[in-house]
Image (cartoon, helix red, strand yellow):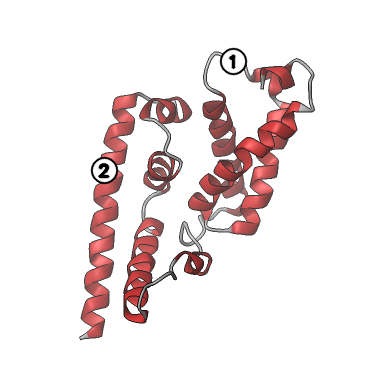
């Protein structure tokens, strides 16, 4: 990014190749809308180019990139004035099931995934964001703290509370679906 900042715009293509997939995954986990995420990723890279002068190289590039992504996500949510449904599109995950699993096991697995995604969708945006960054994007708490402009300890507390809320939501959904089966 320092080379892009210095005027070597061709290096932006290398950054795109390296980071567009993890960035798309982050945005997808936050919104659950694949088509919108493609546009959001493009907006992040546009803003990287536009605001390249603000990258000083003191912190890690990923931290700066996710900070821009959060701002774009917040702008997008403000414009539409709504948070999308589930953080995942369940239909997109069916390809990941398969393999040597029996139909019953596959159905049970799909029901668990559905319940998990529904539970994730019920989390507050702040809790969903911290879980996506820590568990799906596998960022260190230190990096998340820099992105969220808070302390590492506060991030740990948020992750712990988010996991507790996710577990509570998941169990409610699971218990509700089992009651319907009986």
Observer-nearest residue: 141 or 102? 102
Which quarter of the figure has residue 148?
A: top left
The correct choice, above or below, for 64 with respect to 179 in the image is above
Residue at screen point 31% across, 40% down: 159
Q: Quadrant of the N terminus?
A: top right
- Give the structural element (helix, strand or loop) at label 1: loop
Residue 19 picture location, percent across and down = 61, 37
Observer-nearest residue: 31 or 1? 1
Kindly report the distance in space between the C-alpha atoms of the residues bearing marks 1 and 2.
32 Å
Residue 32 picture location, percent across and down = 52, 58
Residue 161 picture location, percent across and down = 26, 43
Residue at screen point 34% across, 60% down: 119
Mark positioned earlier in the residue sequence (1 or 2) = 1
Residue at screen point 61% across, 14% down: 56
Q: Quick one: label 2, few (<14), some, or many (20+) residues within 10 Å?
A: some
Q: Which callout, 1 or 2, points to the residue nearer the camera?
A: 1
Mark 1, residue position: 57
Mark 2, residue position: 161
Residue 82 picture location, percent across and down = 53, 55
- Give the structural element (helix, strand or loop) at label 2: helix
Q: Quick one: label 1, few (<14), some, or many (20+) residues within 10 Å?
A: few
Observer-nearest residue: 122 or 20? 20
On residue 103, the disc is none
On screen, residue 76 versus residue 145, left or right, reads right
Q: Are marks 1 and 2 in contact (CB under 8 Å)?
A: no
């Amino acid at each position: 990014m320092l080379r892009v900042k210095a005027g070597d715009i061709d290096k932006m293509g290398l950054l795109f190749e390296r980071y567009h997939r993890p960035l798309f995954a982050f945005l997808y986990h936050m919104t659950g809308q694949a088509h919108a995420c493609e546009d959001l990723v493009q907006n992040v890279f546009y803003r990287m180019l536009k605001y390249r002068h603000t990258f000083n190289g003191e912190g890690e590039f990923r931290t700066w990139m996710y900070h821009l992504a959060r701002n774009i996500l917040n702008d997008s949510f403000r414009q539409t004035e709504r948070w999308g449904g589930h953080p995942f599109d369940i239909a997109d995950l069916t390809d990941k099931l398969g393999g040597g699993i029996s139909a019953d096991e596959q159905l049970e697995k799909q029901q668990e995934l559905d319940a998990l995604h529904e539970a994730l969708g019920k989390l507050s945006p702040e809790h969903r964001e911290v879980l996506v960054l820590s568990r799906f994007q596998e960022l260190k708490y230190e990096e998340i703290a820099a992105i969220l402009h808070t302390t590492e300890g506060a991030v740990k507390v948020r992750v712990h509370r988010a996991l507790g809320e996710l577990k509570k939501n998941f169990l409610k959904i699971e218990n509700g679906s089992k009651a319907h089966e009986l």
